[in-house]
Amino acid sequence: MDDPDVRPLFPRPLRPRELVALDALAGLGYAFVLVLNSPDAHHPAGWAAIAAMTLPLAVRRRWPLPVFCVVSAASVAAVALGVVREPLAAAAYALYPVALTTRRRRWEPTAAIGALTAGALLLAAFGGVTAVAEVRRIMETVVLGSLALGGAWTIGRAVRERRAYAARQAEQAAERAVTEERLRIAREMHDVVSHTLSLIGVKAGVAAHVADRRPEEALEALRVIETTSRQALTEMRHMLGVLREAPGAAPDALSPAPGLAALPDLAERAAAAGVRVDLDVRVTGGLPEALELAVHRIVQEAVTNVVRHAAPAACRVSVHDEGGQLRIEVTDDGPGRRTLPAGAPGHGLIGMRERVRAYGGVFTAGPLPGGGFRVLARLPLKGEGT
């Protein structure tokens, strides 16, 4: 879990173009150091080797494996030409995104690579090589190169596993929240059916009893019946859209329905999975509890989709009331695709669309032209569900 007292290096997650610029700057800086420190770099072959080692680093996040292959080949050539003294530093920098993005295979010896890297570190620190200068230089190149590559691979795999674990934790939390919501709706439906219909039955009996003698009282009872039945119908229509069976849970453990006040907690959970959420909530006046619950669930599902399909990414959530409508917009700067793994149900967007439709609203979702994904919902603030 992230420490809330530790401030990140950057105030917000970097966009793809900014990451490319950062990698390009690192590559150019490394090239500058090589040119200054290598007397053999000032000839065409040296310039070509240094360029092939450093310039492709700018797109290492876009094409990890091809960039690593090019940089590795150029690094070996540069070492053979005597252009560089420090071994495979650029190749290790290019290997990290390969380890971070490539799916792990069963036969992959990541633990063995980490152990060998630790052994190379100990050998580099304490193991002196008594040999001629040329042999010693070759052995140092092999040992330090193995250390750099093994360290980059091990760290990349460790970060990948951590992100995958955080994503699984977020999905499990979302599933638990859905189960709790279904049970809460079942309890609310019981209250609506029993209490509301009891009130309607009592008022109907009163109206029938006093209709001839006190018509004013009968008319008032009919007004109460009308108002109560409309409210009950609205609540029932909202709840029936999301009610499902959820056996085996304890109703007494249910908490109050989350609303706008719970959105910061949702953002904190998303940050643990690599998605930093920027909240912008501007709602004047209070909202009905059922509508606040709908807003919370829409934002929760949209942010969960960002965690599943785009993490690490930056996400912006805005909830504004404007022109008699409540506007909910969730955008991210991820790849813009929502590719589901094999066997996944993919009901997130469908569930959000159905929830918005239950309130008579409008729902749209899709990739943005410049990259990223957007979920947009507009819910009427008056007459919802009628």
Image: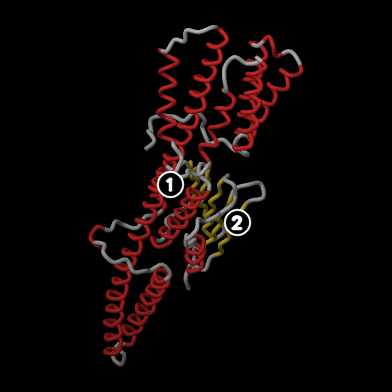
Tell me if mark 1 has few (under 14), some (14-19) or many (20+) residues whose alpha carbon lies within 10 angstroms of its own: many
Residue 150 position within the rendered picture, expressed as x and y whole percent measured from the top left: 48, 28
Residue 313 position within the rendered picture, expressed as x and y whole percent measured from the top left: 53, 42
Taking depth in this image into account, of 140 and 341 the one nearest to the observer is 140
Residue 337 position within the rendered picture, expressed as x and y whole percent measured from the top left: 58, 52
Q: Gap in Å between the C-alphas at discs 2 and 1?
A: 22 Å
Taking depth in this image into account, of 204 and 22 the one nearest to the observer is 22
Dot 2 falls on a residue whose secondary structure is strand
Q: Which mark is residue 354?
A: none
**Furthest residue in direction right, as rendered:** 44
Is residue 215 rendered to the left or right of residue 108? left
> Which quarter shows the N terminus?
top left
Residue in view at x 38 percent, y 47 percent: 169
Q: Which residue is mark 1?
A: 167
**Furthest residue in direction bottom, as rendered:** 212
Is residue 126 rendered to the left or right of residue 53? left
Check whether the beta carbons of the residues at disc 2 and disc 1 lie within 8 A of each other: no
Residue in view at x 58 percent, y 51 percent: 373
Tell me the kind of residue under disc 1.
Answer: Ala
Taking depth in this image into account, of 252 and 81 the one nearest to the observer is 81
Question: What is the image's colouring?
Answer: secondary structure
Q: Which residue is mark 2?
A: 366
Q: Is residue 169 above or below residue 234?
A: above
Question: Which quadrant holds residue 227?
Answer: bottom left
Residue 96 position within the rendered picture, expressed as x and y whole percent measured from the top left: 53, 32
The tag earlier along the polypeptide, 2 or 1, is: 1
Is residue 372 rendered to the left or right of residue 228? right
Residue in view at x 64 percent, y 18 percent: 80
Tell me the kind of residue under disc 2.
Answer: Gly
Residue in view at x 31 percent, y 57 percent: 256
